[in-house]
Image: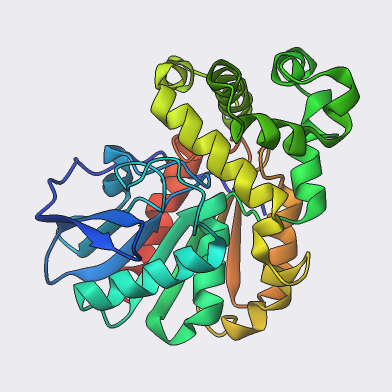
Amino acid sequence: MDIMAESMTLFPIPEPFNTGFLAVDDLHKVYYEESGRSDGKPVLFVHGGPGGGIQTLDRCYFDPNVFRIILFDQRGCGKSTPEAELKNNTTWDLVEDIETLRKHLGVDKWLLFGGSWGSSLCLAYGQVYPDTVKGFILRGIFTLRKQELDWLYQDGACYVFPDFYKDFIAPIPENERGEILQAYYRRLTGDNEEEKHRCAKEYSRWECRTSKLVPDKESIDILENKVWTLQISRIECHYFVNKGWFKTPTYLLDNVDKISHLPCCIVQGRYDMVCPTATAWDLHKRWPNSELCIVPDAGHSSREPGITTMLLKAVDKFKDL
């Protein structure tokens, strides 16, 4: 259902009261932070990408007087080390990292809040550890099905953004464009550093250009951050060419029954070009206990006013969980 709501603004930025690095194996250390109330209601913010990393404003969807706000950078991205590392970096590694973090912080149960790839990881974690979850707030639903990946990278969004897509495919020879993700992955994991960084920037530029209904300066400025472009491009390609390491193409949807007893609010931009509304609709159909809010004047980004407003309203509904 299309839902328009009176605009709401993010909460003021709360300063973390606890930060740290958690060694999750012999290679990876995961950065985490807590803000808000130390005795508040625990909520875990799960960032997108894979490889996107957390940002300061991610703390601001939650009332700091109510919530214990927990954020972390997934393996290889943000402040986590080593940066852009692909070894021991799979969906199931991240699921276990979340559970390790929960135990480390002494959390009994928490609310999960994630968008895009963050929605995928929330679903994967919840399906393995449903008894640790109070509920879900999910945005821009993504389940790594072939049709979802094909839409964005191969044959879908290119019809809406043919000019931007021309730039996206430019680094790839014409005879390799039939499998664009695999072609990018070879270069992003290769030894040619100049080619690697060029591909990282063009890959990231395509995502930034398609993420908002109207691209803004912020979306373009981040492309000058070579560390970020390499993290998100390498890690995304790594996950996508490996199909998320899911047993079946529809794994996340097929296992919704493990969490369908829990409350869930799905916030979806009607004109989301990265994660089209059909996937949110498919999840909602599998999850009768979920609420689907389609924002009629928004794309993919959580920073768009309509999306922000509906996420804030969802958090407010869940504050008494």
User: Can residue 107 be seen in this snapshot?
Assistant: yes
User: Dividing the picture into quarters, in which one does residue 25 lie?
Assistant: bottom left
- Quadrant of the image for the C terminus? bottom left
The x, y position of residue 240, in whole percent, is: 67, 49
Foreground: 278 or 193? 193
User: Dividing the picture into quarters, in which one does residue 192 lie?
Assistant: top right
Taking the spot 43% from the left edge, 51% from the top edge, the residue there is: 311
- Quadrant of the image for the N terminus? bottom right
Q: How is the image coloured?
A: rainbow
68 vs 81: above or below: below
Taking the spot 47% from the left edge, 22% from the top edge, the residue there is: 219
Foreground: 319 or 4? 319
User: Can residue 273 be seen in this snapshot?
Assistant: no
The x, y position of residue 299, in whole percent, is: 61, 35
The number of numbered badges drawn on the structure is: 0
Taking the spot 78% from the left edge, 64% from the top edge, the residue there is: 249
Q: Residue furthest front?
A: 191
Foreground: 59 or 34? 34
The x, y position of residue 127, in whole percent, is: 56, 78
194 vs 145: above or below: above
Taking the spot 48% from the left edge, 28% from the top edge, the residue there is: 229
The x, y position of residue 146, in whole percent, is: 80, 52
109 vs 111: above or below: below
